Image (cartoon, coloured by chain):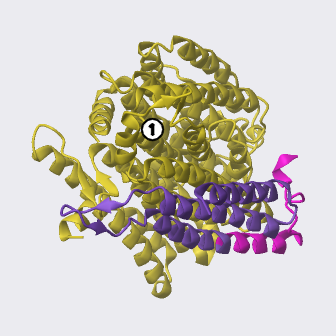
Chain colours: A yellow, B purple
Amino acid sequence: MTLGDLYLISPELSLASLALLLLLLDLVVSRKGFLAALAVVGLVVPLVLSVALWLGLDSTGPEPVNTGVLANTLLVDKFSLFFKFLVIGTVAVIFLMSGEYARKFQRFQTEYYALVLLSATGMMLLASTIEMISIYISLELSALPLAALAAFRRDSRSSESGMKLLVLSGVSSALLLYGMVLVYGFTGSTMLSDVAVKLDGVVFSGGQPFGSYALLLGIVLMVAGFGFKITAAPFQMWAPDVYEGAPTPVTAFLSVASKAAGFAVVLRVFYVAFPAEALSLQWATVFAALAVLSMTVGNLVAIVQTNIKRMLAYSTIAHAGYLLIGVAAVAARAPAGSGDAGPSGVLFYLGGFAVMNLAAFSAVIAISNRTGSDLIESLAGMGRRAPVLAGVLAFALVSLTGVPPTVGFMAKVYIFGAAVNAGLAWLAIVGVVNSVVSAYYYLRVVKAMYMSPALSDEPLAPEPPLRIALLGTAAAVLLFGIYPKWLLDLALTAAQALHLS
Amino acid sequence: MNLESFLIVGAAIFAIGLYGVLSKRNAVTVLMGLELMFNAVNISAVAMSRYIVPARIGSAGEMLPQLLTGQVFAIFIITVAAAEVALGVAIVIAIYRNRETVFVTDVNEMRR
């Protein structure tokens, strides 16, 4: 452990310190609004440090240099830094949108901000880990504060949602751990790269590696464990209840940042530890099956929902399905050749999904802060009562459907393109059909806002920070839809780093 | 004693824990089932570490201390599981204050 190591994990350290600083100041500062502002401004520190690390990787030469930290359990490369940017950005938007909502927590609002920051620290670590014990620790660091946050409102729905999240994330952790231990038992190491070396020349006797099903069982259990985190069907059953009962900003955080971190670790684990051709074909098939299931279940069940948070939960499950198409495409091409297209598509999709889902959630929060209801029918007439809000929500939903000129369209183009290139054209077709189905329930919300008569004529305006979040995310949806090159270059660079690790 | 016995015990306890989580009504019992699953993993991890990890030989041919990765893994799991249960019990108390019940079958407000 040297000072250099500390610098390499400084984004996580500064984020955790910010959380502790907020808790400390909470004891002496009585104006909680000041602390909320400090939480947003304080995010500049980890952001600047992450940018500095990214530029530092550039300056050491033409090839990106990956640097291991803390006995090589963490790896600071552009892949992990991409996710650090994503998580910090998401937290910033979440904080901007929670102002009015968090004031309802009264004297506990600083704890709310601190828990979000601690969970974000876990997610950032998760993107960096290359060793199984630290994967588990980071996963729990990101999941436990989320369970506390889901139960934060302490009414009966919120605590029900917290309980469900805690128990099911516990079960998924146990499955994941059992899988990790089986893999560890066969390879004698918890380092992902050592696992890959050990499995490289793996002998298949009787059709199975090492002549036993145990290693495959371990990999399947790990898929199941991660499947819970990324809300892939058939491990999705917790998501709708948790999303509906949790405070809305927490729901947004769960659906964007938690999922992005989950995909980061899935890509890292399966790309680094199990690239052996015979194995990767097997888990590619598993991910393709999960993708089809998630898309179909998510989209079909979303159609009948009356609560918009619940509908967005099923929509999140469907989007996990689209993302898994990208993961399956990576696997189908790995390890030979230019397998970079797959991961870069997944990264671009995660970035795009983050902005469009956050735009949708900002609008939902702004509306439910005033109407006090999450039902789709309470959105009636919003086109006239709140033209900007309704416009942003409609635009975000159109983007989630995947219609140009939005980022949702570009993201789907790259993901489905990667699938076709990897010889999984049938998977891309299932994805396109599912996108068409999804148009029905997304546009139903738009119809309620513009075609149904309003319940009252009172105009409805969000407070300034929420307005910044709304317009900022909506602008990003449009910008990345028209000019995706910047985000795509970032995703490509990050995906290449994964290839080198 | 051989590795298989430990792994069989681990797998059996894991299955019992999973059954407990899925079938019990009382939220506290569900948390106990969760604990069983984690402890089953601990048994397997330590057994794997004891029996499978190869001996390390130094450059001069001397024996080096065995790597204790599995044992370290178990200690981390025990620590995190303790934190998880503390949070779980806190949430169970919040549920009890709201509804005067700890039966998970009654906690289904959003499934109707």
Q: Is residue A398 above or below residue A56?
A: above
Quarter occupied by residue B103: bottom right
Residue A255 pos. (x, y %): 57, 45
Q: Which residues are magenta?
A: B87-112
Q: Quadrant of the N terminus of chain A?
A: bottom left
Residue occupying the point 72% across, 57% down: A161
Residue that label 1 marks: A270
Q: Is residue A160 above or below residue A23?
A: above
Which residue is more in the foreground, A198 or B100? A198
Q: Is residue B78 above or below residue A299?
A: below
Chain of the residue on which disc 1 is drawn: A
Quarter occupied by residue A35: bottom left
Which residue is more in the foreground, A315 or A415? A415
Residue A23 pos. (x, y %): 47, 78
Question: In terms of secondary structure, where does tag 1 sit?
Answer: helix
Residue A169 pos. (x, y %): 64, 55
